[in-house]
Amino acid sequence: MISIISFGFSFKEYFLNLMRTFPFLLLAMLPLLPSFLFSQHISDFTSLEPGNQDSDFHLPSTHTFQYLIETGEPLTAGGTLPDRCDFTGYVPINGSSKQGYLSINSEDVPGGVTILDIEFDSSLQSWNISASEAVDFSLVYGTQKNCSGTVTPWGTVISCEESLPGATAASGFKSFGWPIEIDPATRSVIDQTGDLAGADKLWHMGNFKHENVVIAPNHRTAYGGEDNMPGYLYRYVANTSGDLSMGALYVLKLNTATDGVWLLLNNTTPAECNSTKVQATNAGATPFNAIEDVEISPKDGKIYFSVKGDGKVYRFTDVDPLSGTTITDFETYVGGMSYPITSLTGTVNHPWGNGNDNLAFDDKGNLWVCQDGGKNYIWVVEDGHTQAVPKVKIFGKTPNGAEPTGITFSPDYKYLFMSVMHPDAANSATTVLDAFSIPRTFDEDVVLVISLLENLGPYGFGPLNIHSQNIWAKRENNYVDIGWSAENPETAQWYVIERKSEHTDWREIFRTAPNVSANSTSNYKTKDLSPQPGSNYYRVKEVEESGAERFSSVVEVFIEPRQIQLFPNPAQSSIYIEPLGMLDKETTVEMIDVSGKQVLSQNMYQKTQIDVEHLPPGLYLIIIKSNKIIYQDKWVIR
């Protein structure tokens, strides 16, 4: 039997529409708003349906994105943004979620780091770049393949060189293969205690292909992995809190499947710092097949690290991160198997695949996993996940040729910053609308900010730009009721209803002149008889006599995918109706002309051909019924 399309409103959406319709309720509800209305978290979404990459960037319909900068765009201090954008570290200014620095790595040869000054414009709900500049690495022999990194608890950035060591420099240290600490405010490499004059790499953290580093809450212990085969997991304990220039370096050795020890390495002289990899191998450290990232859970304090070659994320407990040498509870956290993925179209078992790469925890303990390989998803592993009781979702699907990289969050976890690396140039054939309805192509490396709809662009419950008081939309059977109220300013000439779907730009679907006889607020209503499968967004455009345009806020209605296919449109002699599943025996097909007269009515049980050659050319309405309307659309006959 055909499934009847159901209305896809969330309770939050219902509440927002209620507030728009009855604004006086807002005053009474204000004390509840922080805990009720705005309690939705960036990790609250329905999983995307598993699938292959295409030319577009895909997010849940509850989320949107803004372009910040892409490869080749000019920087305010000169030059352009380099290629191969990787780690994107948001550094808040005075703890702010609306003003900070964004540090962008370039995993290229030569490498680089670009710092953006960014600030959130609350009136436009837009992130703006006020300054941009490349970091000067000339004092530390330059840099190569700046891959991942971290934002330190004290407000600096560490960028890691995923590079094999270069020649030994005059200082005695190898040129490349180190973490580098940067002050984003001055765009400069920090001069660490001792060693070179003017600037230093973090020599005593060891020389190898550093993928990333993460700093423990004690501000002294750092963990980092080696993106190599064999690759080792390292721990560094600084002598002084907030100062990583000197400390003790360890490498992990597993003694059993669940327990292990940290082996102390020599890292005092330049020669000892240069020989980290050899020391680790000779000490019998446990090799892993390319460690991509290491993070610390804010919930359980365990150490999590991804191994790309294994297609797994492991975790363990570091018993005493300052002076101890034992680890326990080593296990696979996620990966190496298939998981039930529940999307809007149902639940399927889908393999995790290979290539898990960059990791990031949000404040709820959800683990965000960027995949470099397989389907190049952005996975979210929800807090409380186990291999026996999995809680895995797909948040993003990157375009052809690309991988997602370098996720960090604003302190309030409303905004996610990331890069899309090396997408195919052929992706320019299609576009995706961003938070401001600007069509965007994903054919160059690009740095994005992502959030829920209400936090970015003209969505959500913010003040309206139009003279409207509210706009609402509600699913009824398979059409959408749309209503709004307006103060009818004298300058208004038209009110236009526009719709945008997941695959189309804004289109006019209805217009009406204002009710000029009214002395106060007037109410208006119309219907969208042809909503598209998926998310449908609606807004009111007020067109003034001068030609100026104002827009309302945007509301969303979700329509489940069609259970049937019809073609062709326009039609000349026949229309073919093909069900995508079993039909109810009482399914009927009707056609209605523009005068409202029914010109055709028949039952259908399977794929059906409707003869329309005898009908006059013109516009018709096709309705397919089974107890309730399940399909309705306009059709042209030539």
Image: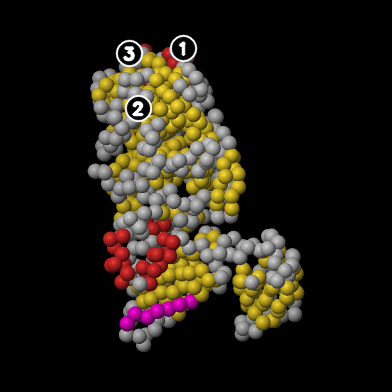
Q: Which mark is residue 610?
A: none
Of marks 3 and 2, the one in the foreground: 2
Q: Residue at x 40, y 70 (%)?
A: 471
Q: CA distance from mark 3 to mark 2?
A: 20 Å
Assess whether residue 521 is covered by the magenta stretch.
yes
Question: Which image quarter: residue 18?
Answer: bottom left
Could you tell me residue 396's position as x and y percent? 50, 47
Amino acid type at circle 1 is Asn
Q: Residue at x 34, y 25 (%)?
A: 321
Amino acid type at circle 3 is Thr
**Helix, strand or loop: magenta stretch:** strand
Q: Which mark is residue 222?
A: 2
43 up-or-down from 107: above or below: below
Assess whether residue 394 is covered by the magenta stretch.
no
Q: Which residue does the numbered mark 1 point to in the structure image?
A: 282
Q: Which residues are magenta?
A: 520-526
309 up-or-down from 287: above or below: below
Q: Residue at x 50, y 19 (%)?
A: 256
Of marks 1 and 3, the one in the foreground: 1
